Image (cartoon, rainbow, N blue to C red):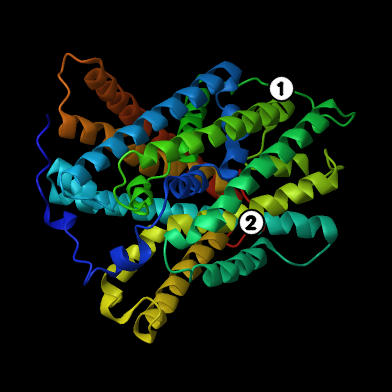
Amino acid sequence: MAEPPKADIHSRHDKDEDGGAAFVLQSKGEWWHAGFHLTTAIVGPTILTLPYAFRGLGWGLGFLCLTTVGLVTFYSYFLMSKVLDYCEKSGRRHIRFRELAADVLGSGWMFYFVIFIQTAINTGVGVGAILLAGECLQIMYSNISVHGSLKLYHFIAMVTVVMIVLSQLPSFHSLRHINFCSLLFALGYTILVGVACIHAGTSEHAPPRDYSLEPKKSARVFSAFTSLSILAAIFGNGILPEIQATLAPPATGKMVKGLLMCYTAIFVTFYSAAVSGYWVFGNKSNSNILKSLLPDSGPSLAPTWVLGLAIVFVLLQLFAICLVYSQVAYEIMEKKSADVRQGMFSKRNLIPRIILRTIYMICCGVLAAMLPFFGDINGVVGAIGFIPLDFILPMVMYNMTFKPPKSSLTYWVNVSIIVVFTGAGIMGAFSSIRKLVLDANQFKLFSSDVVD
């Protein structure tokens, strides 16, 4: 039996002082609530980027990488859940990723490393969600008013205002009903986009299909690693301990049920979006498949009402995604700013909550308006953020906690995943940043077009 991990100063919370634990990360949920949160964190409109990821890999490698990353992430989240369960049984229930990592790995600097990466992920996802939501509004507006004067940043401002209002929901647990609707929206727009792609591919206006990769070998390699980083971002969440924290104790075993619910939705949505979108558009796939179906020039490639309903579903789910990924930022804020003794809705706690969350959302909105790089943001966030937290640290923590024999299959599978995805993360970061730099020549601040 493995020895319990040594206690770390960051793993102990005093709920009399810790507003983040008492208010934001309330432990009241059931396993299906965790399933809703997980699904919202993973199955989002980023799946509409899958055909774009496939264009850098091709059919065979695309299917292989999509399946491999899916299996590895499920395995990784399962191992992290086992580590969390073990710590809970040992009398130290962790509700934050940074505290779990610092405790298990016995390193104070790991606490700050995780909090830095999580902050980058949460901000990146928040910016991406607001940007894509603004783009959804712009698509609808441009089809209603062809010569309208409103620009992308106007719609981003509208989305930001809505997010400021929704961000006042006080706790992660309070999002459970919103996240259930998010699951339904994801299934809805995936079905609609699949139907639209089939219609587009079989119509007389079907675009010519070309599945060839980049002609230059070096460009092909960079594109492949960028695509792998995008896949990592699409499957990643980086907040599993915080999601497990929303479960009513004892949490043991509940997260596995939530994972099974989530990955059932993943199987249905990811493959249908990837196959249908890449089949129609091939190496011309846009970073948002909806834009491919609604080209700037020429007629719509699918019935307008189908695409319009899909865009509405995407828009509504983006609000939920932005809320989910904001929770870590909120609990960091309220850990020190809130006074637990005065109650969640007291004037003392309500005013700082409104001010701090409003400022956070405004910052995300400004960044979204300034940097319209949805596909590229996915790649960078995946390589620098999700790969370390979701593909490397869970394996390290499991080996440190349970100490499987070096002759065991589990040990070598974990080590192999660590080595492979460390290399993929380094190459993915380089290629994603390279593409971001190249695309920087194509845009101006507060541009009205999202760069692929």
Name which residue type carries label 1: Asp
Outermost bottom residue = 347
Q: Position of residue 345 (x, y in %)?
A: 40, 79
In the image, taking residue 41 as reference, residue 198 lies left or right, namely right
Q: Based on the displayed image, in which of its 4 quarters is residue 153 positioned?
A: bottom right
Tell me which numbered mark, 1 or 2, is placed earlier along the sequence. 1
Q: Position of residue 416 (x, y in %)?
A: 29, 21
Disc 2: which residue: 316
Check the image and report above or below for 367 versus 267.
below
Q: Position of residue 124 (x, y in %)?
A: 45, 53
Q: Looking at the picture, tell me which residue is in the foreground, 147 or 11.
A: 11
Q: Is residue 73 visible?
A: yes
Q: Based on the displayed image, in which of its 4 quarters is residue 62 positioned?
A: top right
Callout 1–callout 2 Cβ contact below 8 Å: no
Q: Nearer the viewer, mark 1 or mark 2?
A: 2
Q: Based on the displayed image, in which of its 4 quarters is residue 433 positioned?
A: top left
Residue found at x 17% / y 34%: 401
Name which residue type carries label 2: Leu
Q: Looking at the picture, tell me which residue is in the foreground, 62 or 339.
A: 339
Q: CA distance from mark 1 to mark 2?
A: 33 Å
Disc 1: which residue: 210
